[in-house]
Amino acid sequence: MPAAAEITKVVVHMYKMGTGDCFVLKFHDGNKILFKILIDCGCWSGSKAELIPYIEKLKDDVKGHVNVLIVTHEHKDHVYGFEAGSEIFLEHIAVDQIWMGWTEEDSDPEVKRWKEKYAERTMAIAKAAQEVRNRLDSPGYVSQYKDSQFKDEIFQLHTHFKDVLGEFADLHASDTVKPGLKGMTVVKEDIAKNNIQYFKPGTIMKDIEGLPGVKIFVLGPPLLYDTVRTESGGPGESYDHNKDIDADELLLGALNFHENGNMDEKIFPFDSTYEVSDKDRLKIVETAYKSEEWRGIDFDWLMSSGSLALRMNSLTNNLSLALAFQFPEERKVMLFPGDAEFGSWSSWHDIEWEDEDETIDTKDLLNQTVFYKVAHHLSHNGTAQSLGLKLMTHKDLAAMATLDYSIISSGWKSTMPNRLIIKDLLAQTKGRLMIMNTDNLFYDLDDQIPLAKKIEDSRKKMKAADHKKFLDSLDNSDEHFMEYVVKIK
């Protein structure tokens, strides 16, 4: 009688398209592949011609078939590949099931109402970004600073603001006419074929054909709006920014409105002297750039506007479908949180798991984690501290991060990588930290210690046997993806 199938290892392929997530998971029984999962397919930017070779490689990698496609959330760096490679996905990659978070179930009346409001705001930002571009190109903008001794500095600041705002608009919408991203539309309307499952936190999936013995715990997205909107926690709960960025909230005020069209006074960016009463959000931007009073506004709040993208997309990040793949007999977990931020992480600890086999809590899952897909590209708000990374105490913990400075928003470089997270990751993993591309990344804020060297130095501190085991599991020879093998048995 043949032995029952069991998962002995999981082969992880992290695709190197640029800053963004695209992971293939192959669950093996020995050399036989039992199950294949694709998690997201996106990157920050790139032409169709640049991305197609990666999608072609992915097609061959999965041999034209995946059992489950998981789309964690609707951001360009997670779904752009579905747009760029739509022909390949539709014609050459068969998908059995699609998994998404409950907030993507468009037929749900509450989700539909929320989506409509969210779409209005993202479209407003897209239009505002276009208006800012128009203003900076206008003769009037240039002429108002012709006599200023600081005109070059002003131009530089406003140009940076324009670039970051434009990049943020691109992250959330494909154009200024229709809300949402084309990549997500391809998944929902073309690839899905009405076969999408939506999951709420607290769900435990098990007895899945092809995944013997595996339990999948659904951690997020959270159910409560106050939790979703929470970007960071208090001291010790979440990581500090690389520098003080409180002033970035001011920039958001210029474009963030309540549903009734009134500006949110809690984060109004100007002194009351500069308040205007016009309710049109685009008129706010127009007035700011057209009037001479703009000269009197302190420009400090623009200096770190690169982190605007992080501030504004926190809500969508916290709507990520976050999953923990547990191998109960071995007490090992693989954690894929999408881009979940602190609000989501903290909510995981409130879940009351119901499983007839045993009582388990989120702390147990984190203690058992042997593979962590680092949330939000090593950003300060992508990994909880005391409620997250500090609880990942397994001796075999390894982590993969999708960060590549050659393809990234310029604004994100002020937040990624976060030095405190890097320090803790190296300590928790003992050097088993794998980053998509370490070129131009540094361990220190003075940019004196290359991150690649720091990682290598950390690995050398492992015991000889552990170091060899890790290197045997890692293969970065393929130009399209990095491979890491998670040993289960």
Image: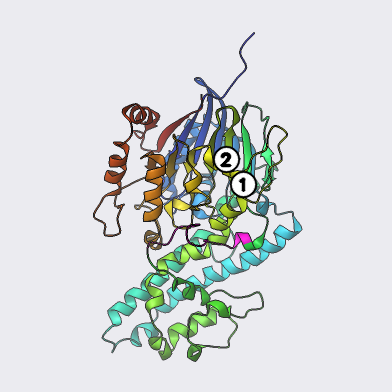
Farthest-out residue, top = 1
**From the viewer's perspective, is 410 left or right of 74?**
left
The Cα atoms of the two marked residues, 2 and 1, are separated by 10 Å
Circle on res. 219: 1
User: Picture coordinates of residue 424 (x, y %)?
Assistant: 40, 49
Quarter of image, res 121: bottom right
Name the quadrant containing residue 408: bottom left
Q: Position of residue 52 (x, y in %)?
A: 44, 43
What residue is at 58 percent from the left and 54 percent from the top?
A: 346
* Residue 294 visible: yes
Location of the N terminus (image quadrant):
top right
Query: What amino acid is found at the position of numbered circle 1 in the picture?
Result: Leu
Most foreground residue, 174 or 270: 270
Instruction: Write the residue at 74% across / 54% down.
Output: 107
Q: Amino acid at mark 2?
A: Leu
Residue at image point 56% right, 35% down? 37
Disc 2 target residue: 365
Residue 88's x, y, as percent? 52, 39
Judge the density around disc 1: few (<14), some (14-19), many (≥20) Cα neighbours within 10 Å: many
Residue 391 is tagged as none
Say if 88 sits above or below 387 in the image.
Answer: above
Q: Position of residue 227 (x, y in %)?
A: 62, 60
Left or right placement of residue 224 versus residue 174 in this view: right
Look at the numbered discs 2 and 1 and tell me whether their residues touch, using CB distance below 8 Å: yes
Judge depth for marks 2 and 1 and give the one in front.
2
Query: Magenta part of the protein: which range?
Result: 227-242
For the residue labelled by badge 2, is the local secondary structure a helix, a strand or a loop? helix
